[in-house]
Image (cartoon, rainbow, N blue to C red):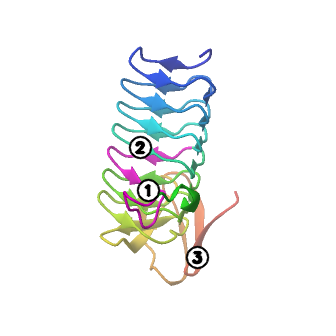
């Protein structure tokens, strides 16, 4: 347990790897096989499964369960009570542990409060999933997604503000906060190196 802080009510199973300066709050359970990076915050009543990897500087808010086969890169925000799944078609009377689907949340993504991520998808870099949205397909980098099922309604900057560009076409825009330059080519948004 050297290097991270865990509340006395938290359960961190022997073998779990938690990076320095990470915090594990009240009534949270981290399973033995979990790998968690540095500077993370696991809020109250969080569950982290055995086959889970979490990068650095990830914030997991209260009441989030991260089940096996979910992989989260650096700087991701998981909002309060958002949901991950790992079986596509669960039945209580049929064991489907061999059918877990991988879910990847890429760097800097934000998963809003109470959203649901159906297993087997990739969530693109710096995308933003609105509160209550249901994601059932891959999400492009920088996409702003809302609704049930979620639909893309715009593009979001690395800074976290909606960009004033169309969903599809050709456009360039510079973020007024960071100076980052974004290039839209058809339906793909990229950030240009500075």
Q: CA distance from mark 3 to mark 1?
A: 27 Å
In this view, the residue in front, 44 or 165, is 44
Which-is-in-front pick, marks 3 and 1? 1
Residue 102 visible, this angle: no
* Residue that carries the numbered disc 3 in the rendered image: 188
Position of residue 13 relative to residue 163, above or below, is above
At x 43%, y 59%, the residue is 128
Classify mark 1: helix, strand or loop.
Answer: loop
Residue plotted at (61% across, 41% down): 55
- Circle 3: element type: strand
Could one spot residue 175 in this view of the protein?
yes
Question: Is residue 190 located in the magenta-colored stretch of the structure?
Answer: no
Mark 3 is surrounded, within 10 Å at the Cα level, by few (under 14), some (14 to 19) or many (20 or more) other residues, namely: some
Real-space Cα separation, disc 2 to disc 3, in angstroms: 31 Å
Residues drawn in magenta: 75-94
Image location (x, y in percent) of residue 92: 36, 57
Residue 193, position as x, y percentages in the image: 70, 60
Q: Which residue is mark 1?
A: 85
At horizontal 41% and vertical 43% (from top left) the residue drawn is 65
Q: Which mark is residue 6?
A: none
The answer to which image quadrant residue 106 occupies is bottom right
The residue at which mark 2 appears reads as 65
If you read the primary sequence from the N terminus, does the residue marked by circle 2 or circle 1 appear first? 2
Of the image marks 2 and 3, the number of the one nearer the N terminus: 2
Depth check, front residue: 158 or 87:
87
């Amino acid at each position: 347990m050297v290097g991270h802080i865990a509340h006395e009510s938290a359960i961190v199973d022997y073998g779990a790897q938690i990076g320095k300066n990470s915090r594990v709050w009240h009534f949270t359970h981290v399973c033995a096989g979990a790998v968690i990076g540095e500077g993370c915050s696991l809020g109250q009543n969080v569950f982290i499964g055995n086959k889970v990897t979490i990068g650095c500087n990830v914030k997991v808010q209260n009441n989030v369960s991260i089940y096996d086969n979910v992989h989260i890169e650096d700087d991701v925000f998981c909002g309060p009570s958002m949901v991950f799944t790992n079986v596509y078609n669960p039945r209580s009377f049929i064991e489907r542990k061999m059918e877990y689907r991988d879910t990847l949340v890429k760097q800097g993504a934000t998963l809003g409060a109470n959203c649901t991520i159906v297993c087997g998808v990739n969530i693109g870099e710096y995308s933003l999933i609105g509160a209550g949205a249901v994601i059932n397909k891959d999400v492009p980098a920088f996409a702003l997604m809302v609704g049930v099922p979620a639909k893309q309604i715009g593009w979001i900057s690395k800074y976290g503000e909606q960009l004033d560009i169309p969903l599809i076409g050709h456009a360039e825009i510079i973020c007024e906060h960071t100076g980052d330059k974004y290039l839209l080519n058809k339906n793909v948004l990229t950030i240009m190196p500075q």
